[in-house]
Amino acid sequence: MPSRKEIQWSQLKVGVLVLVAMAVLVGLIFLMSGSTGGPFAPKLTLRSYFANASGLKNGAPVTLEGVTIGSVIRIRVVPDRNPTPVEVTMRVGEEFIRDLHASSTTSIAQAGVLGDSYVDIDSSDASGPPPANNAELRATGSPSIQDVIRTSQVSIDEVSKLVRKLEVLTDSLNSTHGTVGALINDPRFLAKVNRITDDLGKITSQISQGQGTLGKLVNDDTLYNRANETIGNLDKISSNLEQGKGTAGKLLKEDALYDNLNSTVANANQLLTQVNEGKGALGKLAKDPAFAQKLDDTVSRLDSILRGIDEGKGTIGQMVQNRSLYDHADQTMDQARQLIQGMRDNPKKYLVIRLKLF
């Protein structure tokens, strides 16, 4: 049998264990009730009356602008307070009293569509002194679960539409309609894709081996050397331009060309000014109506002469249009040529000088 000392020692260990467990329990209670200042902190009791509890339960959180400051301690129905018979008694920590006002309002809110209900105190537009203990805070309209679900109906409808579209898309993918559906279900399309993949593999293999134009472009150093030479020539040209060599370099560097160009522009401007003022032949041509009329008359006469020639009028017109006149002229020229040729061949026949004496 264990001795008395051993029994006392065991009882001491059990007592210490119980004390430690109680200390841990008290600490947990303090941590769990930290939002209201702990179980031994002074509290402030407040009341509000609602038309419907909306699923609110004892122990539900009480928040101020989203921050938990207390909890619901009692919910009961007071028929005399119709149409707001539901009395909700809340207990909040006194350290939050400075953030509350007698005109603050309460409402029952839900943490999401299917979340638990809680009491939310709104002091954003409130003023005045803090509420007294057991004071009543005015309740505002609070949505019920049905109201929340009703307001979420639009989102539910949109989700339903999206689900239907996904079903249609899935059906299309499971069939051979469309590119993706054919890619998944049509073996012929898949065979074509495989052939294209094989061809691409061959092409890339040829390119990596330096075959063909692209292969030489990738693997042959000749193109790189030519490009390097071209860049060197461009650098040389830019250096010559910077040094003022050549025509383009002089165009960039020498002031004489600029002066000449400026002088040319000035002369052209002066010439245009004189033309606009009606001076000189070009000025008269542009500004003098009499000169323009003479020019118009001259052009009209030339047009009339050319029209007469085209119609075969006059000597020139006959020469241009009359075939018989052309034939006679051609025949006369041929006879003249024969006469000249005969005189060259036998000049004595045509050049006979006779002297007659008295």
Image (cartoon, rainbow, N blue to C red):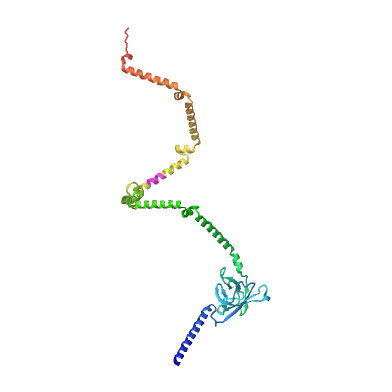
Is residue 263 magenta-colored? yes
Residue positioned most to the top: 358
Q: Nearer the viewer, residue 36 or 21?
A: 21
Is residue 254 visible from the viewing direction of this image?
Answer: no
Q: Position of residue 162 (x, y in %)?
A: 54, 59
Q: Position of residue 299 (x, y in %)?
A: 48, 32
Residue drawn at the location 31% of the way across and 16% of the way down: 347
Classify 293 as above or below 47: above
Horizontal side of residue 32 vs 338, given as left or right: right
Is residue 57 magenta-colored? no
Magenta-colored segment: predominant secondary structure: helix
Residue 42 is drawn in which quadrant? bottom right
Q: Position of residue 84 (x, y in %)?
A: 66, 73
Q: Which residues are magenta?
A: 259-265
Residue drawn at the location 51% of the way across and 82% of the way down: 25
Q: Position of residue 72 (x, y in %)?
A: 59, 77
Residue drawn at the location 50% of the way across and 36% of the way down: 289
Residue 81 is drawn in which quadrant? bottom right
Classify 296 as above or below 41: above
Is residue 191 visible from the viewing direction of this image?
Answer: yes
